[in-house]
Amino acid sequence: MNEAIRVFIVDDSAVVRQVLTEILSADPALRVSGSAADPLFALERFKQGWPDVIVSDVEMPRMDGVSFVRRVMAERPTPVVVCSSLTEKGAQTTMNVLAAGAVSIVTKPKLGVKQFLHDSAQALTDAVKGAARARVSRLLPPDPERMVRHSADAVMPAPGSEALACTTERIVAVGTSTGGTQALERVLTALPRVCPGIVIVQHMPERFTAAFAERLDSLCEIEVKEAAHGDRVMPGRALIAPGGRHMILRRSGALYHVDVVDGPLVNRHKPSVDVLFRSVAKYAGRNALGVIMTGMGDDGARGLKEMRDAGASTCAQDEATCVVFGMPKEAIKLGAAGSVLPLEHIPGVIARGIAH
């Protein structure tokens, strides 16, 4: 029998520590090994035994979340799940914590936090279990830093055999989850300004995708923005699906744009990679490249297969460079990936718009 995953909670709110302890302890696969009101207390407790996963706030006394994660990664790299408030400031800070090596985000509001966390119990436990499987070394900066399971059918019908109007414009669709914020940063910062238009789903809560896009835009030669309904997909621009909404590629003549729509969770996610990939299969077909990268679960695997069946070029990130080899693995098993590539080769593939 496998040992329970040891989880340590760091939050200056006694209520949050209590509620998180109750929720996580209710899952037999998890064991809360302790909690602390700030990072310095936590680091002292770690001397008695390091946890398997740390759940940490980002705005705390005596040491901020970014410094805490950097300290953890320097001393003993350990998966950190960020528990962040739904505020603009919290979103910006969380992006810096993810860049420092945190694995994923769970959210909490300023008010009604107890009920919110109870309502989010499944997401919390899933995040911790996913973090426990993450290979944290892949998150470090390179040298020199119970719900109904819907398919994409719930948002849009499967692609048919309708003929596409001729166009030479390439579209690149990218899907990723756990470990994807760091992977996307490495990929997009390596792209030249002259590259195909890119549409991206990164599993991330509402309000955080805007801050993520702003951070990438400040680092990249290409334009990166959170997608808005009707945005044009054009060369030199990457559109990131907003948290809490699905993103669908559409086409008008030879021009592409995106629709940002509501709908049910697909594969437990909104935005869903499967939804985006299905729309790309339908409206771009052989003019597209599909890329599936690090992430937990199987969202995107079927959509990538639909893209390949529609004539698109497809690739998956290899196991050696993934933080979590879940989504790419499932896509490879389905025969959806035309090639399997290390992370460092993906920018070149995107720049060409074809995976060979």
Image (tube, rainbow, N blue to C red):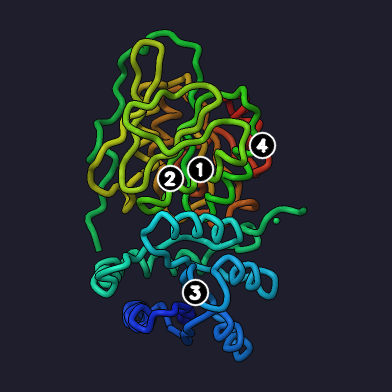
- Packing grade of label 2 (10 A; few <14, some 14-19, many >=20) is many
In three-dimensional space, the C-alpha distance between marks 4 and 1, rounded to whole angstroms, equals 17 Å
Mark 3 nearby-residue class (10 Å; few <14, some 14–19, many ≥20): some
Query: Whole-percent x and y of residue 26?
Result: 32, 81
Q: How many marks?
A: 4
Residue hosting label 4: 190
Name the foreground residue: 72 vs 345: 72
| Badge 4 amino acid | Ala
Q: Amino acid at mark 3?
A: Met
The answer to which of marks 4 and 3 sits earlier in the sequence is 3
Q: x%, y% of residue 9? A: 46, 79
Distance from disc 3 to disc 1, alpha carbons, whole Å, reads 24 Å
Of residue 53 and residue 314, the one placed in the foreground of this image is 53
Name which of mark 3 and mark 2 comes first in the sequence: 3
Circle 2 residue: 210
Badge 2 amino acid: Ala
> In the rendered image, which quarter contains the C terminus?
top right
Mark 4 or 2, which is nearer the eye?
2
User: Which residue does the numbered mark 3 point to in the structure image?
Assistant: 60
Instruction: Give the mark nearest the N terminus, 3 or 1.
Output: 3
Q: Are marks 4 and 3 in contact (CB under 8 Å)?
A: no
- Circle 3: element type: loop
Q: Residues within 10 Å of mark 1 (few under 14, many from 20)?
A: some
Badge 1 amino acid: Glu
Image location of residue 324, percent across then percent down: 53, 57
The residue drawn where x is 46% and y is 85% is 35
Q: CA distance from mark 3 to mark 2?
A: 23 Å
Element type at marker 4? loop
